[in-house]
Image (cartoon, rainbow, N blue to C red):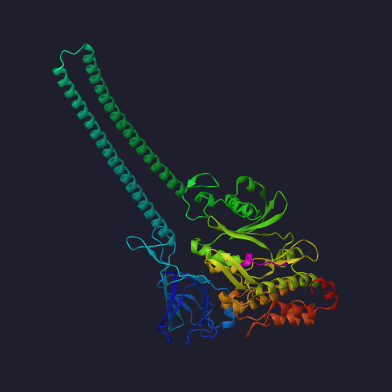
């Protein structure tokens, strides 16, 4: 069964009620109506605490509640009564890990008990397995429900191990059939030999009787004609000698044939033994694989495992293995068969463009043409089993299918030895956030607008694109892809000119990585977890976020490009609670030089309550264009 988390209310007005979670969730708990778990107890604060659930892992942080939060009776958070709730929420609060059976006291009279259920794993390889009536935790529901398998003792095993066991049984059955066939052939040969020998014996017996008859007749003639001439005696002796020679010849022929039969039987035994050894060698060759990093033989855990465990830890060897897959097979689409070493040598890594906690981005070049590409590596924070890999690649293939001048082209997404890589188009100008650093922290109005209008074209295309991709489980179709991680760092520039072509990167990859369970906890303060470009709708319900969350993120990115600031003031505050409950600062307070009409458009697009102010990228672009001063419109007329 899959991992899951159960929260049971054990004290308070809702005592006995349970909340079950099978996938990643961010839960606000308190008396406020928009909390994920609403506890109508007066001793519970409006926004009492926040839980991050990634089954079977759970963390909790108190938001400065009045009556405190208690883990197994020990206080882990509470504000002084002299401090207001608003001031307490501005502070950063410590995060605590929860374990199965822990109790969480909220206020004086309310208590939650945590129960975690670990995934059922294969007894052979340790991978997670599902029962026949269960499905995985990914967002995408498979076309067919997974089947449950068990070994001879009734213990659960995965489908791959079950296939190995069935293959072994088939091999044993085939070996038994082969032995039975050989035994049957030997029995038939022995029977035929016995028939032949009996026939030859009967023929010899008839010949012997004939000889005896002749001998007897000749003896009678000798008795009757004792006085015959010596010539007749010589003739008789000659006949006896011929008969003896014939008899000896028959005996010799019989012995010769018996010897040939024994030799054939020995040769057949030698052939069968050689065939048995050949089959055993073939079986051993299937079980082992040669590491492309060091050349040692090792037993791979998965089909894409081409490096031994030691070489997987070497980033250079892992990168070379990825280049062998990505560059050898994708950039030469007309090449057939396997990729040899000569193909790989036609490509070289040039330099590392960037690095982070989860991977690196490399510049690689095809030496024959001189064309440069970007190779992005993504290292999972948890072990990537076959289910997680298939889930990630199934979602990521939607991003591969996008083709638009303002969307970075993705050539291939795949997995090598447990690490994921994305081969994509290279933008020489780098990302917009790096461009802002080179320009002093923000961009001029004309440049920022030129970049944003193109990015909005890319978003509009992706949100409405009809996509059809071929996956392992068949053809998958989708209408529209939501980015979910739109920010200046994911907008890239084609070159270093003043008005470069802008392209949106990483469509759907962040969501696919989260959905597949390859990123464990999102910690506040890391680049991937800071939600400063996410609206409250995405924080509260990130799984089912609609395209409008990308439009809000685009408005926040435009705000950031023009002012160098993010829309909400999170300094000295808990970033999650501020992004969920805080209000954006009007942009003209950051920079009074922003034109009033354009400022009104940006402020309207950053509205979140009761719903996001602008729903589509096309609508946001149209409003920006109408609000631009005439001289800026004239400058940007090529993309309006």
User: Left or right: 433 with respect to 360?
Assistant: right
- 391 drawn magenta: no
Q: Residue furthest left?
A: 223
- 404 drawn magenta: yes
Up the image or down, 622 lies above or below 407; here it is below
- Quadrant housing residue 563: bottom right
For the C terminus, the image quarter is: bottom right
Pick the residue in front: 445 or 259.
Answer: 259
Q: x%, y% of residue 510?
A: 60, 67
Q: x%, y% of residue 88?
A: 57, 79
User: Left or right: 523 with respect to 424?
Assistant: left
Q: x%, y% of residue 450?
A: 78, 71
For the N terminus, the image quarter is: bottom left
Pick the residue in front: 332 or 217.
Answer: 217
Residue 147: tell me if it is visible. yes
User: Left or right: 144 with respect to 331?
Assistant: left
The region drawn magenta spans 398-405
Q: x%, y% of residue 430?
A: 72, 61
Up the image or down, 420 lies above or below 559; here it is above
Pick the residue in front: 160 or 219.
Answer: 219
- Quadrant housing residue 278: top left
User: Left or right: 25 with respect to 212?
Assistant: right
How many numbered circles are shown? 0
Label the magenta part by its dominant secondary structure: loop
Residue 528: tell me if it is visible. no
Tell me the residue at 43%/79% (across/down).
Answer: 112
């Amino acid at each position: 069964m899959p991992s899951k988390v159960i929260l049971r209310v054990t004290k308070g007005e809702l005592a006995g009620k349970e909340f079950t979670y099978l996938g990643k969730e961010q839960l606000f708990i308190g008396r406020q109506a928009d909390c994920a778990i609403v506890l109508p107890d007066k001793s519970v604060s409006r926004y009492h605490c926040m839980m991050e659930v990634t089954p079977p892992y759970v963390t909790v942080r108190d938001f400065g509640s009045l009556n405190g939060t208690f883990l197994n009776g020990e206080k882990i958070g509470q504000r002084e009564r002299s401090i207001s709730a608003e001031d307490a929420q501005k502070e950063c609060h410590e995060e605590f890990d929860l374990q199965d059976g822990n109790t969480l006291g909220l206020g004086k009279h309310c208590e939650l008990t945590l129960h975690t259920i670990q995934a059922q794993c294969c007894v052979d390889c340790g991978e997670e397995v599902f029962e026949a009536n269960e499905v995985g935790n990914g967002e995408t529901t498979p076309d067919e429900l997974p089947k449950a398998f068990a070994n001879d003792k009734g213990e659960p095993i995965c489908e791959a191990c079950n296939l190995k066991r069935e293959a072994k049984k088939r091999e044993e059955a085939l070996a038994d059939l082969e032995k039975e066939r050989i035994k049957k052939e030997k029995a038939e040969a022995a029977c035929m030999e016995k028939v032949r020998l009996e026939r030859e014996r009967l023929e010899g017996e008839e010949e012997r009787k004939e000889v005896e008859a002749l001998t007897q007749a000749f003896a009678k003639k000798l008795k009757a004609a004792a006085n015959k001439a010596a010539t007749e005696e010589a003739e008789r002796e000659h006949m006896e000698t011929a008969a003896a020679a014939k008899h000896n010849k028959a005996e010799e022929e019989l012995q010769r044939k018996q010897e040939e039969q024994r030799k054939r039987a020995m040769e057949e035994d030698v052939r069968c033994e050689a065939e048995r050894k050949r089959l055993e060698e073939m079986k051993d060759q299937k079980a082992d694989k040669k590491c492309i990093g060091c050349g040692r033989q090792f037993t791979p855990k998965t089909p894409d495992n081409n490096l031994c465990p030691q070489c997987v830890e070497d980033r250079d060897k892992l990168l070379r293995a990825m280049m062998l897959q990505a560059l050898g097979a994708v950039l030469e689409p007309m090449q057939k068969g396997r990729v040899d070493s000569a193909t790989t040598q036609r490509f070289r890594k040039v330099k590392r463009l960037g690095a982070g906690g989860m991977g690196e981005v490399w510049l690689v070049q095809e030496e024959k043409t001189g064309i440069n590409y970007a190779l992005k590596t993504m290292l999972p924070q948890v072990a990537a089993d076959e289910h997680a890999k298939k889930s990630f690649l199934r979602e990521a293939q939607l991003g591969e299918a996008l083709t638009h001048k303002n969307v970075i082209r993705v050539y291939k997404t795949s997995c090598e030895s447990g690490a994921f890589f994305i081969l994509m188009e290279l933008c020489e100008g780098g990302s917009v956030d790096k461009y802002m650093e080179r320009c002093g922290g923000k961009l001029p109005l004309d440049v920022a607008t030129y970049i944003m209008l193109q990015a909005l074209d890319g978003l509009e295309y992706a949100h409405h694109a009809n996509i059809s991709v071929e996956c392992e489980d068949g053809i998958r179709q989708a209408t529209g892809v939501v980015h979910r991680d739109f920010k200046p760092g994911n907008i890239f520039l084609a070159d270093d000119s003043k008005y470069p072509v802008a392209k949106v990167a990483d469509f759907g990859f962040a969501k696919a990585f989260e959905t597949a369970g390859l990123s464990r906890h999102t910690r506040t303060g890391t680049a991937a977890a800071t939600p400063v470009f996410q609206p409250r709708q995405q924080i509260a319900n990130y799984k089912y976020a609609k395209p409008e969350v990308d439009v809000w993120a685009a408005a926040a990115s435009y705000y950031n490009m023009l002012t160098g600031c993010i829309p909400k003031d999170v300094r000295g505050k808990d970033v999650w609670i501020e992004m969920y409950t805080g209000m954006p600062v009007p942009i003209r307070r950051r920079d009074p030089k922003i034109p009033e009409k354009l400022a009104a458009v940006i402020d309207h697009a950053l509205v979140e309550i009761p719903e996001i102010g602008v729903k589509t990228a096309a609508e946001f672009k149209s409003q920006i264009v109408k609000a631009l001063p005439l001289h800026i419109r004239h400058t940007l007329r090529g993309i309006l």
